[in-house]
């Protein structure tokens, strides 16, 4: 192989390296552009509107959390799952997942019901917090996982703190 051939191959290799670097820079610019556009897109918004006593069973006390979710898109959006954690006295007393709870209505607000079951033995362990007013201070954390087109799974985190009444004896026999 002659000197001219070696120089030509070296020039071709250097040109190829520069082309790859330019393409890499172009891809980075495209990714940044898409990320900016996605960040500016309207996204569904949600809030916890209410947490109330629902029922007493042999195994647990059930509370119902109502979550309003607004969908700004003209198409329905599937909800992958709803994750929840119910805390009192700085400890988790119930947690769970609601698999495949349906879809968000297109260009509308959807009301989701999240059923939280707290075992009786855990409520008994909260006697100090219950006190004379027969309620517990709580924190409810909900992660609403939805499937947005192009973006993929997107979690809307929600948190609400408050007080909730415990069932009375009459609730057991009602």
Image: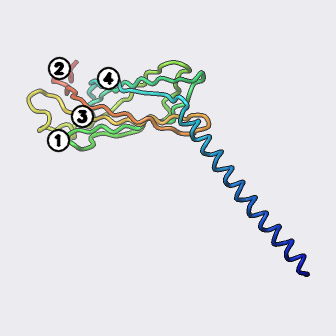
Give the position of the N terminus as an image quadrant. Answer: bottom right
Residue 170's disc is 2
Seen in the picture, residue 103 relative to 14 is either above or below; the reply is above
Q: Which residue is mark 1?
A: 125
Label 4: element kind = strand
- As drawn, the label of residue 112 is none
Q: Could you tell which of marks 2 and 4 lies nearer the N-terminus?
A: 4
Quote the CA–CA distance across marks 2 and 3.
23 Å
Colour scheme in use = rainbow
Kindly report the distance in space between the C-alpha atoms of the residues bearing marks 3 and 4: 13 Å
Foreground of the two, 115 or 75: 75
Give the x, y percent position of residue 115: 36, 29
141 or 167: nearer the viewer: 141
**Label 4 sits on residue:** 50
- Label 1 sits on a secondary structure element that is loop
Ranked by sequence position, the earlier of labels 2 and 3 is 3
User: Could you classify mark 3 by the number of other residues whose Cα lies within 10 Å: few (under 14), some (14-19), or many (20 or more)?
Assistant: some
Give the alpha-carbon distance from disc 2 to disc 1, as whole Å: 21 Å
**Mark with earlier residue (3, 4):** 4
> How far across and how far down the image is residue 16, in percent?
78, 63
Left or right relative to 104: residue 140:
left
Helix, strand or loop at mark 2: helix
Residue plotted at (20% across, 37% down): 123
> Left of 59 or right of it: where is 44?
right
Residue 165 spot, x, y in % from top left:
20, 26
Q: Earlier in the sequence, mark 1 or mark 3?
A: 1
Which of pointers 2 and 1 lies earlier in the amino acid sequence? 1
Give the crowd class for mark 4: few <14, some 14-19, many >=20 residues within 10 Å.
Answer: few
For the residues bearing labels 4 and 1, Cβ distance under 8 angstroms: no
> Does residue 23 sit above or below 17 in this rendering?
above
Asked where in the image residue 82 lies, by quadrant, the reply is top left
The residue tagged 3 is 138
């Amino acid at each position: 192989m002659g000197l001219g051939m070696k120089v030509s191959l070296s020039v071709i290799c250097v040109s190829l390296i520069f082309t790859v670097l330019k393409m890499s820079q172009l891809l980075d610019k495209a990714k940044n552009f898409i990320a900016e556009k996605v960040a500016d897109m309207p996204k569904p918004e949600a809030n916890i509107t209410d947490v109330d006593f629902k029922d007493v069973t042999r195994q647990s006390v059930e509370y119902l959390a109502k979550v309003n979710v607004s969908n700004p898109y003209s198409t329905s959006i599937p909800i992958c799952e709803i994750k929840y954690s119910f805390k009192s006295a700085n400890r988790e007393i119930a947690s769970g997942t609601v698999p495949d709870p349906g879809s968000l209505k297109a260009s509308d607000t959807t009301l989701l019901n999240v059923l939280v079951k707290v075992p009786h033995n855990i409520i008994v362990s909260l006697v100090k917090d219950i006190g004379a007013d027969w309620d517990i201070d709580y924190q409810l954390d909900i992660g609403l996982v939805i499937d947005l087109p192009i973006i993929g799974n997107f979690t809307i985190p929600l948190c609400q703190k408050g007080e909730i009444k415990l069932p009375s004896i009459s609730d057991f026999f009602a």
